Image (tube, grey):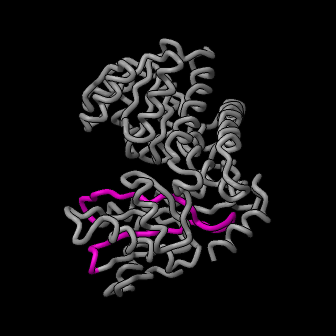
Amino acid sequence: MAFCKKMKEFTDVKRFQDLIESQPDFDAHEEVVFARDEQTGLQALIAVHNLSRGPGTGGTRLWRYDQFENALTDVLRLSAGMTYKNAMAELPFGGGKAVILAPKEFKSTRAEFMQAFGRAVESLQGRYCTAEDVGTNCDDMAEIAKSTRHIFGLRETSGDPSPYTARGVLLGLQESVREALGTDSLKDVRVLVQGVGHVGYHLCRLLYEKGANIIVSDVNETALARCEHEFGVDVVAPDRIFKTAIDVYAPCALGATVNERSIAQMKCGVIAGAANNQLESNETAELLRQADILYAPDYVINAGGIINIACEVSQSYNAKIATQKVDEIQGRVREIFARAKAENKTTLAVAGEMARERFQTGQSSSFRVEDLTRTAARMA
């Protein structure tokens, strides 16, 4: 395992290695990379979790972390989640993720900062392929692409993945409502969307079109105002989320909002949202089952964005084909619910078993391998 590829040498590789292996979320990751660039002030972590199905592929998150260990925890959890997400979606990708530690202010331009990160991605020689994520956008991807060929989701290809992520979440949410509430319609179903950034906004739009009763919560007043103006949503303060009587809780911001404390307060029957790692731990899934709250595993229903990106691999990108692939999420969710009920297991446990069947046994992708080879050759 290579623990440190860098643009400027990490001062103590052994200490870094020990730090990584001591993390509870370290899961035999194939590679964990710390990259920094003195000129631009870049500090980033890239984690490659598993390469059994293809290059470790996942977005780049730009976030301000209170301490380095929090960023490390995030990248380890997120990269492992991408292994499961890509396997469940039957994509020709392994699991990888990157987090950039957002500076208080950029030493250089944001463009130069992103180009420096692109050089870090390029140094992994295709073992990690990046795309847009929380805190980054299509402009950032265009700058990163100036320094690396190992990138998906550019404007000229599949573009912003957020609408496709939102579509997959909606399908998972609909299937959850059908299973838990016994209705095929979302009309007047009370859905609380926590976080109305890129994906949350698009989810609100889709819910509005379905006639749902939408409640939103966010710390970004501008984002809240936009949703109020366009969709007539109700707004609740973050500290009132779990005290609000709703049918569906849709977390679409950062993870770990579902835990023993929040479950004790929840007044909903379904959890189905876009955020990664929504559950504080695997044990939280059993608490949800005991509380009779149906959980749609996040890495299953939020895979629409990476599915859209994967459509760059198998053919010339076509939005209609991407939409058809995203729509397959609903059938996967239905299968998870059926197996969980039949086997008396949590939905998370069943989804994990299905994903491991795909990436541990080398189960083939629904995307053609020869097309992936062509893409790899193009990027090499």
- Image coordinates for residue 50, horizontal then vertical, percent: 60, 66
Q: Which residues are magenta?
A: 38-67
Q: Magenta segment: does it hold 304? A: no
Question: In terms of image quadrants, where is residue 350?
Answer: top right
Q: Nearer the viewer, residue 160 or 50?
A: 160
* Left/right of residue 201 with respect to residue 351 in the rendered view: left
- Image coordinates for residue 249, horizontal then vertical, percent: 43, 28
Point 50% across, 15% down: residue: 211
Q: Nearer the viewer, residue 345 or 268?
A: 268
Point 46% across, 79% down: residue: 3
The C terminus, quarter of image: bottom right
87 to 176, vertically: above or below: below
Point 28% across, 59% down: residue: 65
* Left/right of residue 157 with respect to residue 113 in the rendered view: right
Asked if residue 24 can be seen in this view, the reply is no
30 to 277, vertically: above or below: below
Q: Magenta segment: does it hold 39? A: yes
- Image coordinates for residue 334, horizontal then vertical, percent: 68, 31
